[in-house]
């Protein structure tokens, strides 16, 4: 029995790309070794006519095309999770609608699982052509940092575009955390993984919704989700400041007893106080970030809310 391959496609304001994505993916159906193809488009609170495009695709191919529409924008991570929950295929692929993830790689990815017995076949960009230099710099910096402070390896250039077995998908779904960081989750669950290198592709149409600010916030979520080192740094900074303060106190007392003069330099003292206060606020901010994540988890709110599904 050939089985089924599910494609999960998060969509946010993708009205221009959907009419191009669907036919491009349909072209490779005959290369999927007899597997039937199931689409799960996740409309993540789009503000354009994305939902109308999805309804049209579903009406034209009701057997294979399905969509989920959220009540508002919950973010790509929530859309990925919703798609993984809805997918019924023996194999599940995650890809973007803008064709930066080439559908032509799917047959090779499938061969990696069926012939080479990998559990996951992902993709890794060999370059960042077309990306702003400042974004590339901070992206590379993030990957160097996260791999130094986390026990979960996250390779630079790896995209969410990957093909997984049902066993891998079930393992990912068992992780029900609210603040999700899929790049880390995909790596954390383990399994035999292979990455296919490919050159970076520009969006086929439309504009990306990932601003620099959103990417920075996303990177902070990843650091907090997969490393406790910032908490250790906060503790070290607090302890170091305490030791310096004790040494300074002994110096001031001894100076007063030996020389009998008052301590001069009030401006420098005030500067030091401000510096120490800043360090304290920094440490409180680090601790607060972790407490904030705990707060979101214990409230147990749904990761997403479905308004419409078909």
Image (tube, helix red, strand yellow):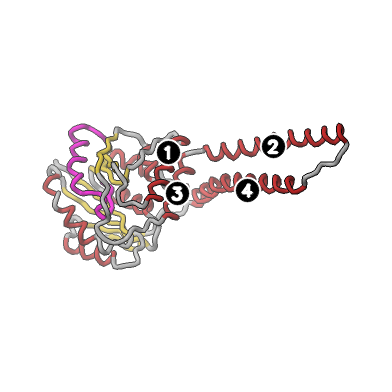
Q: Residue at x 56, y 36 (%)?
A: 232
CA–CA distance in space, label 3 to label 4: 24 Å
Residue 242 is marked as: 2
Of the two numbered discs 2 and 1 in the rendering, the one whose residue sits closer to the viewer: 1
The spot of residue 9 in percent (x, y) is: 28, 53
CA–CA distance in space, label 2 to label 1: 31 Å
Residue underneath mark 4: 281
Q: Report helix, strand or loop for mark 3.
A: loop
Q: Report helix, strand or loop for mark 1.
A: helix
Residue 154 is marked as: none
Q: How many neighbours does mark 3 have within 10 angstroms: few (below 14), some (14-19), or many (20 or more)?
A: some
CA–CA distance in space, label 1 to label 3: 22 Å
Q: Report helix, strand or loop for mark 2.
A: helix
Residue 179 is marked as: 3
Q: Quadrant of the rendered structure where residue 196 is?
A: top left
CA–CA distance in space, label 4 to label 2: 15 Å
- Direction from residue 229 to residue 137 in the image, left or right: left
Q: Is residue 61 magenta?
A: no
Return the disc, 1 or 3, that comes first in the chain's sequence: 1
Return the disc, 1 or 4, that comes first in the chain's sequence: 1
- Relative height, residue 13 to residue 230 (above, below): below
Q: Residue at x 24, y 50 (%)?
A: 7
Residue 144 is marked as: 1
Q: Report helix, strand or loop for mark 4.
A: helix
The spot of residue 217 in percent (x, y) is: 46, 51
Q: Residue at x 30, y 48 (%)?
A: 129
Compare residues 225 and 155 and report the one nearer the observer.
155
Q: Quadrant of the rendered structure where residue 125 is?
A: top left
Q: Residue at x 54, y 50 (%)?
A: 292
């Amino acid at each position: 029995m050939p089985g089924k391959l599910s494609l999960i496609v998060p969509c946010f304001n993708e009205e221009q790309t959907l009419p191009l994505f669907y036919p491009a993916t349909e072209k490779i159906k005959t290369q999927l070794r007899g597997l039937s193809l199931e689409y799960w488009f996740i409309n993540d609170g789009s503000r354009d006519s994305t939902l109308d495009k999805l309804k049209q695709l579903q009406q034209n191919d009701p057997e294979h095309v399905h969509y989920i529409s959220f009540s508002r924008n919950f973010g790509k991570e929530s859309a990925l999770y919703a798609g993984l929950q809805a997918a019924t295929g023996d194999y599940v692929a995650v890809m973007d609608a803008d064709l930066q993830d080439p559908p032509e790689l799917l047959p090779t990815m499938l061969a990696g699982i069926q012939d080479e017995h990998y559990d996951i076949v992902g993709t890794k960009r060999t370059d960042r052509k077309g990306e702003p230099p400042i974004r590339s710099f901070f992206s590379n910096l993030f990957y160097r940092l996260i791999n130094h402070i986390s026990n979960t390896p996250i390779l630079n250039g790896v995209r969410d575009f990957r093909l997984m077995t049902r066993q891998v998908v079930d393992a990912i779904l068992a992780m029900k955390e609210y603040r999700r960081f899929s790049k880390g989750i995909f790596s954390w669950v383990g399994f035999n993984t292979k990455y296919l290198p490919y050159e970076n592709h520009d969006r086929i149409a439309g504009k990306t919704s990932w601003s620099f600010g959103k990417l920075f916030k996303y990177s902070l979520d990843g650091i907090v989700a997969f490393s406790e080192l910032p908490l250790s740094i906060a503790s070290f900074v607090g302890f170091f400041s305490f030791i310096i303060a004790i040494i300074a106190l002994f110096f001031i007392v001894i100076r007063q007893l030996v020389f009998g003069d008052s301590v001069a330099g009030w401006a420098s003292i005030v500067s030091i106080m401000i510096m120490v206060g800043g360090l304290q606020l920094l440490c409180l901010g680090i601790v607060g970030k972790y407490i904030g994540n705990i707060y979101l988890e214990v409230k147990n709110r749904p990761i997403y809310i479905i308004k419409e599904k078909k």
